[in-house]
Image (spheres, grey):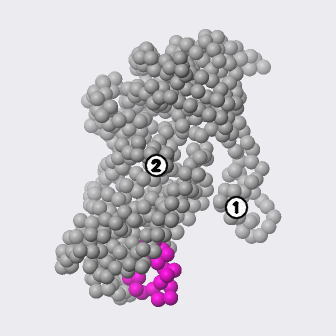
Amino acid sequence: MRPIVQVRNLSKSYRLSQAAQVGRPSSGGFARRLGLSVERLRGLRPGPDKTIWALRDVSFEVLPGEVVGIVGRNGAGKSTLLKILSRIVRPTAGEVDIYGRLGSLLEIGTGFHPDLTGRENVYLNGAILGMRRGEIGRKFDEIVAFAEVEEFLDVPIKHYSSGMQVRLAFAVAAHFEPEILILDEVLAVGDAAFQQKSFRKMQDVIREGRTIFFVSHDSSAVLRLCERALLIESGRLKDDGPAETIVKRYLAGVAAAARA
Amino acid sequence: MSELREVWAHRELLYFLIWRDLKVRYKQTALGPAWVVLQPLLMAFVFTVFMGWLARVPSGGVPYPLFAYAGLLPWTFFSSAVSTAGNGLIVNGPMVTKVFFPRMLIILALTGVRLTDLLVSFVALLALMGWYGVGVRWGILLLPVLVLQVTLLAVGVALWFSARIVSRRDYATLLPVLLQVWMFASPVIYPAGLVPEKWHLLYSLNPLAGVVEGFRSALFGLPFDWAGMVTSGVVTVLLVAYSVRAFLRADENLVDII
């Protein structure tokens, strides 16, 4: 089968401490002492910037319908990888080829506005995620029923409880149906009952045969949802294989680091 | 070009972003959209007192309040669009770093919001013209072209500033100062004829000079300064082309430094 996502030699570097230079004491004229050189304003000054590699030489392929978990410690590069796959961040080197409509949920409720009503926010948030107006309209009743906010649809969401807000946000996200879906820690919202409901909804989405990338610190969620997993360590793809094996290795590594 | 195709593909989001801002702005206000008309009207009143009555600035045979209001319409649109859209990427930072869509859309949406304001404030202008007994002439047919030009201009300047502000916040502080200077360098509250002859060429390089004068000529049936308007049009096209390129180049790593 032809892969739906191909990632080849992907690297991403960030330059740090650009801002720290402004105001650094230096010799020279008055203007320079005030930190006002033209080069600095134009951002061209080639100072002693530190380059850090958030991702280094990552390559993998994903087939249609695969559900891939991405595990790794904080700062390993998981979010950077998801952002590059989502086209939000551009890679420094390497290529990403995606054959299909891709949608990402790196955060739920993006663009929610407190002064708008529940109804208005559903349409707005759906449009921001990449849904068509017609599509939102068709799924509107389902979204509202899922979020359990029917009675408050025409109330500004600033009057919602925080639980109601996240339920509505999750409900919109869960009814978004691209061919390739990228999920970052979005399942852990609401109370225990709603979390179970969200989890079942995700399992339904998986059964429909969509390709999914899933990042979570909850290893049991990765094990229950994913068949395959990638282990990222310090920006490198350390391991790639069946979810069970990879999660076990990841947890063993974390335990070893904790003992050391 | 691929970027422009991407913008077109996201046109529905553009509509929703404009709709959101219009909707949100007047929640919890008593006067609501009336502010769109009231704001330039109040400004026109202030300038009428100081410039029209006290300083006796000439207004080309048009009653000064009408003269000022007609100049303030394109200027208020331009300056409010540039100052909100210029800061748009920062203000919408959470959205820009969490979802993919062409970043240019933010600038277009914020300009679009101000453009609807401009269209609404035309209604008050027509009422004001009726009050002063100034009739509509054929020249008004040129007005849509001038509105298009000032819109392009606002988008261009906002694109350039928004990219600069992301990397250096200094530009956010500079922007209102520049706009203040720009207003006095444009014939908003005085006629361009007040500028000495030898400075005319330099003056007409300010693209807003042609737009604002053009607005008045179109509305009040005054003669058009064709040379000035063509110069202003050419400068507008060059400025927009340059800004779009600068924005797209900066867009490569905007998200990394926002």
Mark 2 residue element = helix
Q: Residue at x 21, y 79 (%)?
A: B134
- Residue at the image point whose x is 74% and y is 16% from the top: A256
Q: Which residue is drawn at the image coordinates 74% and 48% (left, top)?
A: A49
Closest to the observer: A29 or B79? B79
- Relative to the observer, which residue lies in front, B73 or B199? B199
Q: Residue at x 59, y 32 (%)?
A: A96
Task: Answer yes or no: is residue B105 visible.
Answer: yes
For residue B206: magenta?
A: yes
Residues shaded magenta: B188-209
Count neighbours of disc 2 (C-alpha within 10 A) and say few if under 14, some if 14 to 19, many if 20 or more.
few
Provide the secondary structure element on which disc 1 rests: helix
Q: Is residue B181 magenta?
A: no
Of all residues, the one furthest to the right in this rendering is A27
Label ID, residue A39: 1
In contact (CB < 8 Å): disc 2 and disc 1? no
Q: Nearer the viewer, residue B26 or B201?
A: B201
**Placement of A161 over or under A246, stated as above or below:** below
Up-down relation of residue A66 to residue A45 (above or below): above
Q: Nearer the viewer, residue A121 or B139?
A: B139
Q: Percent position (x, y) of residue A99?
A: 50, 28
Task: Name the amino acid type tagged 1.
Answer: Glu
Looking at the picture, which amino acid does disc 2 mark? Leu
**Which SS type dominates the magenta stretch?**
helix
Q: Is residue B176 above or below residue B50?
A: above
- Left or right? Give the position of B253 relative to A36: left
**Residue B182: percent from the left, percent from the top?**
48, 72
Quarter of image, res B63 = bottom left
